[in-house]
Image: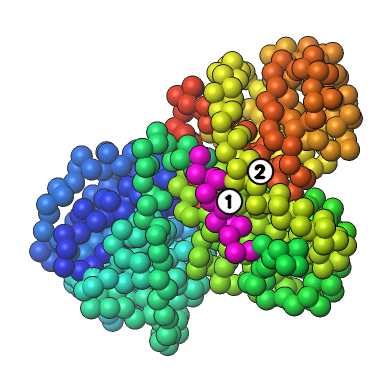
Amino acid sequence: MCGIVAYTGSKPVMPILLDGLKRLEYRGYDSAGVSVISRKKLKTIKAAGKLNHLEAKVDRNISAHCGIGHTRWATHGGPTDENAHPHNDTKKRFAIVHNGIIENVEALKASLGKATKYNSETDSEVIAHLLTQQTGDLASRVLAVLSQIVGTYGLAVVDQNNPDTIVVARNGSPVILGIGDGEMLAASDMSAIIRHTDQVIHLDDGELAELTPGGFKVMRMDASITNKEAITLKDLNAHYDLDGHPHFLYREIVDQPGTISQTISGRLDERFSTAHLGGLNLEARDLIGVKRITILGCGSALYAGMAGASMIESLARIPVVAEPAAEFRYRNPVIEQDTLYIVVSQSGETFDTLAALREVRRKGGFVLGIVNSVGSTIAREVDGGIYMHAGPEVSVASTKGYSSMLVAFSLLALLLGRSRDISPQRGTSIINELKQLPQHVQQVLALEPDIAKLAKRYKKSSSAFFIGRTHGFPIALEGAQKLKEISYIHAEAYPASELKHGPLALVTKDTPCFVVLPNDDLLPKTISSIEEIKARGGPVIAVTSAPASESERIDKLAKAVIRVPDTGELTSPVLFGVVFQLLAYHSAVSLGRDVDQPRNLAKSVTVE
């Protein structure tokens, strides 16, 4: 889980590499380094810690026009200068940066013999030494080495004997080419290169590319040439700036009225009271034939999928389950022809979700994707799907991405519901609900001062509970996730009905309990759960859309109440989610946490 940037062209390479690494910081890392070719000599500089440690060692004015850079999350070996990438061979002719895991590293080391001296504890370094054992040009050497490797890689290699050439390769870890005017770039993430070009090519697994200032050549592992066409990306660069906000996370929270509008835009068919989702590649008769749905995701995407399952079951009366993508693929799942499979991933590169997608398709299943990143691997490999159009998300904790996933599921639930069970009148009501959602989110954002006070009141809590019933339980899961991942306060989520089956034993006066209270048929039962918590001395914070008739009762039971607009069951998860995003954000800020780059976490998990 790390970042790559590479450049060859006429411009000084060091500022480009350092800027690219800076833009990759949001993915999470514990060390960084660069290798450049200057006056036919390879120079490698690297440092553990934040990027400023590397910058202190670097001469930005070094005369070099070709190089590679890397930010690393430690897997094999701790976060030290020696374990940082790039890695060199003994004679320092080659430099490599590598994302992924080499599973047969011990066998490869044995093949090199005991005479080979290693400078790091990493699995990646073996690639540099293997390159010295090959012959031919750089691309041929890399192909020969990759034929020996078992595992995953996103790879970039330079050779001081070929001072303007970079070779990159991909298997399970993303690599993107950027096409410039007399220059070529490569990166593991669009953020590192979008400032320099909007023409990009995504490598597929099993592909290698040779880059020179004059252009590129893409080939398969058998050295046969492939024809890859660039896609044009527009208006992405602005998303990588703070725009006056203190953190990217905060910007992405307050941007949600706009990003939700983008997700909805052009997708409401008011004439037929349904949703227009042309990218599904499914006809109306195909939708009627769906007997059940399985939703797969990881982290916040899974919780959005659980909420989506409730939406679809409620409106379309189709059995739906949501489960972790990694667990699904390892239990040898039964793939059925009348089941629709949906994978959910903000980045479109999540390793476990991609592996689950491939397992389903290998067994003949039809897979839709809900993805944010245009051109990502999942977006390219699914049979159809929905782009979220939320724009790049920089902060590790997902906010606008999560909300846009919920909106995408709302649109899909509307479409499936109208094809099966709900009336045009109900469809029109849902459309109006979706059209008003950006305005309702803005109303929730206006509650920020009250939410910030709550965050400060409970910031010293060692643990917190989030509870909800049926539709509210996925919201509670996501609320707990947000609080623990950026504030480091331990948080657990439970269905309200499960309190008596264990969790009540942990409720004390020092354990805040955040209760999801939507205005639904189960509101009285969830209020009863609040009474159980209060009877054990636990402070209750109610987040509710309950009507005025229930307000007095809730006010008596709860230490604090946050009231959100009373919308429908499809859009209320978004509103409750925004409350918990602000709660987590202000908790983290008041505790002095690194809000955008929480410890031990990466934005996109691209290794198993």
The residue that label 1 is drawn on is 260
The three-letter code of the residue at mark 2 reads: Val
For badge 1, the amino acid type reads Ile
Front residue of 139 and 191: 191
Would residue 260 be counted in the magenta stretch? yes
Q: Residues within 10 Å of mark 2 (few under 14, many from 20)?
A: many
- Pinpoint residue 62: horizontal percent, then vertical percent: 12, 54
Left or right: residue 345 compared with residue 376:
right
Left or right side of 262 for 243: left
Q: Secondary structure at mark 1?
A: helix
| Residue 472 position in % (x across, y down) | 77, 39
Q: What residue is shown at x 47% (from left), y 64% (from top)?
A: 174
Q: CA distance from mark 1 to mark 2?
A: 10 Å
x and y percentages locating residue 28 in the rendered image = 44, 44
Which of 427 and 118 lies nearest the eye of the viewer?
A: 427
Which stretch appears magenta? 254-267
Quadrant of residue 262 in the image?
bottom right
Considering the image in quadrants, where does the C terminus appear? bottom right
Residue at 60% x, 64% y is: 266
Depicted 243 relative to depicted 187: above or below:
above
Question: Can you identify the residue that label 2 sits on?
Answer: 574
